[in-house]
Image: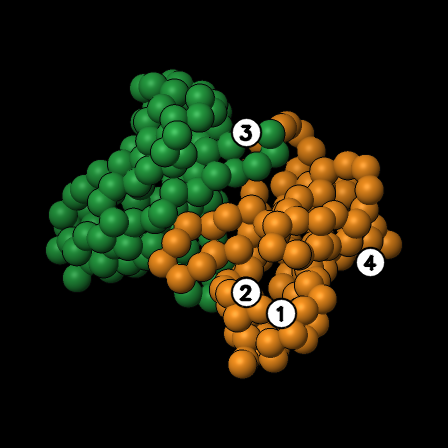
């Protein structure tokens, strides 16, 4: 049981490039979330999903897109990377009032 | 809208001393309450949660927290700090609309433990 996995662990992007952050869970959870963590700011919700085919915006969705074609996978897409998107990104899935977090992806945009 | 306040950004204690990390929330109705811990370069791990029932909640690694509705607080304590407790701690709340509602996090507190 791997829990929540994220790839890649680290990535450096140039301004204007695009990329997809991958997230997968093997706990059969319907609820999944994407957060970004910036120093001293806690975690901010980007997007979330309550099941395959259903997604909704969180607190800071601008510059990001998501899709949820299966229960297991919840990728986060950055279309035109900007320096303001330099952050650590965490994916989580939820069951029984508990969110389970992946190890994170550290993204730098230069 | 819900909000979470964690006063201060850093707490330093000696090994063996009491750990007290404060959390206050703002919500129109009592929410679900959580404490998460983040060790360096890792994701967040649930320490404990309050959803219903007994207001004193025990979690992993000897931590506990008490929900006080009158004070809108959910402070985290541990009687005796250990070096391995050094980490960042986040208080979070969610509303009661569903079993897995969205979390609102505080800004986090870094705990340092001195030998």
- The mark that comes first in sequence, 4 or 1, is 4
**Dots 1 and 3 on the same chain:** no
Q: CA distance from mark 3 to mark 4?
A: 29 Å
Relative to B7, A63 lies left or right: left
The answer for which chain carries disc 4 is B
Residue A48 shows in the view: no
The answer for which chain carries disc 1 is B
Residue B71's disc number: 4
Residue B86 shows in the view: yes
Query: Drawn colour of chain A?
Result: green
**Dots 2 and 3 on the same chain:** no
Instruction: Report which residue position mark 3 lands on.
Output: A95
Instruction: Report which residue position mark 2 lands on.
Output: B85
Q: CA distance from mark 4 to mark 1?
A: 25 Å
Which element type, helix, strand or loop, lies under badge 4?
helix
Pointer 1 local density, CA inside 10 Å: few below 14, some 14–19, many at least 20: many
- Nearest to the eye among marks 3 and 4: give it: 3
Q: Are marks 2 and 1 in contact (CB under 8 Å)?
A: yes
Chain letter corresponding to the colour orange:
B
Which element type, helix, strand or loop, lies under badge 2?
helix
Q: CA distance from mark 2 to mark 4?
A: 26 Å
Q: How is the image coloured?
A: by chain
Task: Looking at the picture, tell me which residue is in the foreground, A7 or B26.
Answer: A7
- In the image, what residue occupies the spot 32% across and 19% down? A69
- In the image, what residue occupies the spot 61% across and 50% down? B60
Q: CA distance from mark 2 to mark 3?
A: 26 Å
């Amino acid at each position: 049981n791997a829990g929540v996995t994220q790839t890649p662990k680290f990535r450096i992007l140039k301004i204007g490039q695009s990329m997809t952050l991958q997230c997968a869970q093997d706990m059969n959870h319907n609820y999944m979330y994407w957060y970004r963590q910036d120093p001293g700011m806690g975690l901010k919700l980007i997007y979330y999903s309550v099941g395959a085919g259903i997604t909704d915006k969180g607190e800071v969705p601008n510059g990001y897109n998501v899709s949820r074609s299966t229960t297991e996978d919840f990728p986060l897409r950055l279309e035109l990377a900007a320096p303001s998107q330099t952050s650590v990104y965490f994916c989580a899935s939820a069951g029984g009032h508990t969110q389970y977090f992946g190890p994170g992806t550290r993204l730098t945009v230069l | 809208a819900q909000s979470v306040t964690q006063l201060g950004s850093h707490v330093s204690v000696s090994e063996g001393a009491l750990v007290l990390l404060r959390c206050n929330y703002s919500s129109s109705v009592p929410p679900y309450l959580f404490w998460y811990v983040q060790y360096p370069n890792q994701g967040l791990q649930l320490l404990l949660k309050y959803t219903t029932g007994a207001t004193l909640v025990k979690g992993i690694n000897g931590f506990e927290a008490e929900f006080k509705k009158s004070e809108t607080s959910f402070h985290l304590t541990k009687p005796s700090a250990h070096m391995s407790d050094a980490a960042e701690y986040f208080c979070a709340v969610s509303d009661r609309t569903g079993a897995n509602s969205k979390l609102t996090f505080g800004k986090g507190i870094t705990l340092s433990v001195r030998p």
